[in-house]
Image: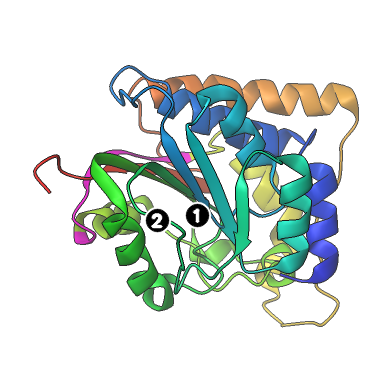
Amino acid sequence: MESKQYEIMATAEDAHWWYLGLRDAMLRCLQHASVNLTDHPTVLDAGCGTGANLRCLAQALEPSYLAGFDISEQAVEHARRKCPQAQVFISDICEPKLPRQGFDLIISCDVLYVPGLAAARSGLDALVQSLVPGGWLLLHLPAYQWMISAHDRAVHTRERYVVSHIRGLLDALGLHCRLGSYRVCGLLPLIVLRRLPSIINKSHSPRASSDLTQPPDWLNRWLLTTLRLENRLIAHGYRLPWGSSIIALGQKPTSC
């Protein structure tokens, strides 16, 4: 990701509807009764970015141990400031160097699309190995390869996905897929419309930039409310038929 994108993320993720909606979805799925996370779990954020997800997990789950890594030193510095109680370090999801084993929960939100699943596969295997039996892996990824736009080029997106592909990935990793759904369903037409010119024009322009901007408060609240309604449906077992993102949750077999 470009250096300036980390600065945009560090500012936007505290108040922007998209980031707030992502954390709402993550917590609703993790706190559903069917997940049954242990009290004070050990938690890793694989690709923690600038730290808002780590802070959210610290507040909501009260983990006994919380860690996160990112490939960017700039992101790690932001994450350490936002969540000083977490152990935050530099590492690569393709070859993660972990300070310990035995995680109850590992999340990876909008990370794997940068190297691509093939390049990250051995790293994912290592992450799954570090889960305790019965532990959980939560993934969040962008949907639909045809949606690649100037925003994706600015954040170095290599791949976007479909739900069946991610369900298959969890199966191949030896996990039971407990949840797999599209997200941002109702807002998909608006997102496509906004990005349509750069979706059509696949030129790798050096001027490609993210379209992440903070909307007016009233619009930000309306967009977030829409996502929260969708998130409730997903957490209670409904699978949305389309969307700009995918959320998936896999569990390691207890017999491992």
Q: Quadrant of the N terminus?
A: bottom right
Q: CA distance from mark 2 to mark 1?
A: 6 Å
> Which residue lies at the image location 52% right of the left edge and 30% below the top edge?
25
Q: Magenta stretch?
A: 172-182
Q: Amino acid at mark 1?
A: Ala
Q: At numbered mark 2, what does the secondary structure look like: helix, strand or loop?
A: loop
Q: At numbered mark 1, what does the secondary structure look like: helix, strand or loop?
A: loop
Is residue 177 in the magenta section? yes
Kindly identify which residue carries mark 1.
Answer: 143
The quarter of the displayed image where residue 201 is located: bottom right
Q: Nearer the viewer, residue 51 or 63?
A: 63
> Which residue lies at the image location 79% right of the left edge and 45% below the top edge?
81
Residue 97 disc label: none
Q: Is residue 99 left or right of residue 229?
A: left
> Which residue lies at the image location 41% right of the left edge and 55% below the top edge?
100
Where's residue 215, x and y in %?
A: 87, 36
Q: Is residue 246 left or right of residue 208?
A: left
Say few, some or many: other residues with alpha carbon within 10 Å of mark 2 (under 14 / 14 to 19 / 20 or more).
many
Where's residue 8, x and y in %?
A: 84, 54
Q: Nearer the viewer, residue 214 or 115?
A: 115
The quarter of the displayed image where residue 150 is located: bottom right
Q: Is residue 131 above or below residue 75?
A: above
> Which residue lies at the image location 15% right of the left edge and 43% below the top edge?
253
Q: Amino acid at mark 2?
A: Val
Where's residue 163, x and y in %?
A: 36, 50
Secondary structure mostly seen in the magenta stretch: strand
